[in-house]
Amino acid sequence: MDAGANLRDARTLMAAKAILVKAGRSFATAIEEAQSDAERFGMWLDNEGQAHWERQRRLRTEKLNIDKAALFRKQIQMTADGRPPSVVDEKRAVARSELAVQQAEAFLRNLKRWRGEYQRLLAQFRAGMNPLSHYVDQVVPTATAALNRMAQSIDGYLATTVKRSDPDGIETFGRETSELGAEADGAGSMRRSTQESTTPAVEPTKAPPQP
């Protein structure tokens, strides 16, 4: 036969609630940090990244113009013997500067493409975070409130239930009404038996003899 629940207190529920609340706060912090990093990179693509590579293109173009001017000056010069000087180094410098300008322009083109692609990925990221956000915003508060109600119900039950100790010393709370009534009837019968056993018997009065 089932002995019923052995309820001691609501400490286990409160421990579960503490774990749940801690997990919810950790998730909320992780969501906030991830969203902040994602938004920050998107802002860099739209603002700082664009400005950075536009500035690099301008500086590299200026360097290319300087190298081209140096190459031109070298080409119009003549050596002492009337031959044109070597312009190998100047041509290499111009080639490097042209490559640097081309790289800056490529980065600018890619930035435009990356901005559109990143916005699409950012939308997917937000959609993927929605279940976790729902857990933090809805599930955790609902579960916490449910645990609070359960704990209050248990505390109220324990406060109004008869406390009893079993032979092994384990405290068990609760007693069914029928059991209480049976024990009360048994105690009343024992009291009546005791009173009857302790009361002296009254002998019948004998009639006096006839003369």
Image (tube, grey):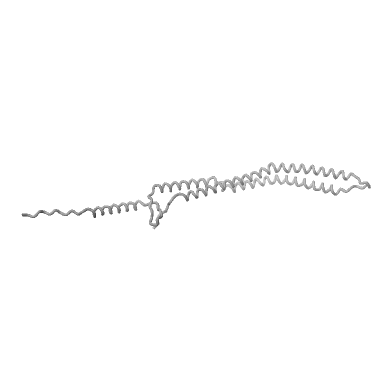
Residue 45 lies, in percent from the top left, at 68, 44
54 or 21: nearer the eye? Answer: 21
**Vertically, is 167 above or below 65?**
below
Q: Residue visible at 42% across and 53% down? A: 6
Query: Horizontal placement of 100 versus 11: left or right?
Result: right
Residue 102 lies, in percent from the top left, at 77, 46
Q: Residue visible at 90% across and 44% down? A: 77
Q: Quadrant of residue 186?
A: bottom left
Q: Residue visible at 43% across and 51% down? A: 8
Query: Horizontal placement of 148 versus 98: left or right?
Result: left
Q: Residue visible at 27% across and 52% down? A: 191
Query: Which quadrant: the N terminus?
Result: bottom left
Residue 9 lies, in percent from the top left, at 44, 50
Q: How many numbered tags mark residues here? A: 0
Residue farthest toward the bottom in the current orientation of the protein: 1
Query: Which quadrant: the C terminus?
Result: bottom left
Query: Horizontal placement of 136 versus 166: left or right?
Result: right
208 or 13: nearer the eye? Answer: 208
Residue farthest toward the left in the current orientation of the protein: 211
Residue 19 lies, in percent from the top left, at 52, 49
